[in-house]
Image (cartoon, grey):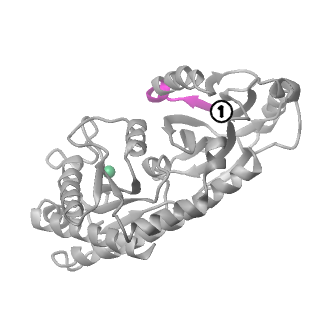
Amino acid sequence: MGLKWLVACLVVLSTSSALAHMEHHVSGSMGRECALTKVFQHEGKLSSKAVFLFSGNPVCTYIPRELDEEKIANGEPLKLVFFVPHATIKKESKSAIARLNNETCTQDYCIKVNQVTTPVKGIQFTVSYYPQLHGFEYQSFKSITGDEGVVFNFHNQSLLQQVNVKASTERIRRTAFTELPTVILDFGHGGDDHGFTNGVLLEKEMNRQIGQKVAKLLKKKGYQVCLVREGDESLALDERTARIHACKNAGILISIHTNAAARAEASGIETFCHIPDMFTTHYQQANKDTIGILQEIDSVVFEQSMQLAQAVHKNVLETAKIKNTSVVDRKVKHKVAQLLLGSEMPSILVELGFLTNQEEALLLQKSSYQKDLALGICKGVDAFFNMV
Ligand SMILES: [Zn+2]
């Protein structure tokens, strides 16, 4: 893609001179038209995240400014400014931005998003937080939808200092042998959000039918199941991640989807999970100990997500083969999905077949094939908990 993310952390300039400098800078080939299309907020236990998706090629730059250490030591918030030149705000993201501008500032951190026109057109992010409470990190990634993403992370420093990583991973190990942990199931789409539809088939219906079969089978095996949405309700993504964090004794998260493609021939099963390589850290300001703990937790979660993805993928392919003999293995893939980004436990997203493929769509509507897929997911869950 040739995308270049710039971070000018080393040079301390005032905001205005940095912007003037930028005017010269972005008039070259690097600044391109881009638009802020989506905004998400994920309130996790360890971190809160604000996520911004852009179409086009955004170049998000840290604008260095002098920090008044005395004021910060006296309990005033730390203020950081980031700028995306040439960026505009799409109409559909305006209400989410208004909400972000109003709501986060009632908490102990604050993000203000502003469209500016001088000295160059662009979007300015002003982030403020209390370094005694939060560690801050700015990362970029490529989303599952192909958009470029920017994420501002606010880590809960005091909670991270209390977490004993070894103990929390041991807990997952132990529960595998004593009591079965909670499996969180997310049926992709619902309410006004139909997912894929061709007018006859609705992805949300398919996902729910299969998901309910998975829930039933898991409960039969003794797992606790926590559903992100029970019925056909409209739920914003931020609310879905909030519900995930409200599930008790949460072990793993599985988001169930069916696929669609422009090519009618496309078919098969694919599973997504996150890996550390997908995120590039551009700016970090936090207590070294807590960042170390967070990285350790992340690496365990990423590793277990991969194990879960492989176990579920392998077993779903096997059970799908009973009726879908030439099912295509589209493999375990790594793309950033918002729901997975907002969860703090091992998480995967499964795409169980293509509704745009005539044969696969027919199979997916059959209750017996849905049962096979559900059984595959449960076998994968069992295999995962026997492994960790
Ligand atoms: Zn979907």
Residue 314 is situated, as x and y percent measured from the top left of the image, at 34, 76
Give the residue at x 43% y 37%.
238
Q: Is residue 237 or residue 58 the one in the foreground? A: 237
Residue 90, magenta (yes or no)? yes
Name, please, the residue furthest toward the front: 178
Give the residue at x 51% y 60%.
274
Residue 303 is situated, as x and y percent measured from the top left of the image, at 53, 67
Query: Is the distance from the Cβ of mark 1 to the nearest ligand 1 atom less than 8 Å?
Result: no
Q: Is residue 296 or residue 16 the one in the foreground? A: 296
The residue that label 1 is drawn on is 86
Mark 1 residue crowding within 10 angstroms, few (<14) / some (14–19) / many (20+): many
Q: Amino acid at mark 1?
A: His
User: Dot 1: what SS?
Assistant: loop
Quarter placement of the N terminus: bottom right
Residue 299 is situated, as x and y percent measured from the top left of the image, at 59, 63
Q: Is residue 115 or residue 311 the one in the foreground? A: 311
Q: Is residue 102 or residue 325 the one in the foreground? A: 102
Q: Horizontal placement of 361 versus 146: left or right?
A: left
Question: Which range is magenta?
Answer: 87-94
Instruction: Tell me if residue 273 comes above or below residue 84 in the rendering.
Output: below
Q: Horizontal placement of 110 versus 146: left or right?
A: right
Q: What is the count of numbered marks?
A: 1
Q: Is residue 45 visible?
A: yes
**Which quadrant holds residue 122?**
top right
Q: Is residue 27 visible?
A: no
Instruction: Tell me if residue 191 comes above or below residue 258 in the rendering.
Output: above
Name, please, the residue furthest toward the left: 367
Residue 203, magenta (yes or no)? no
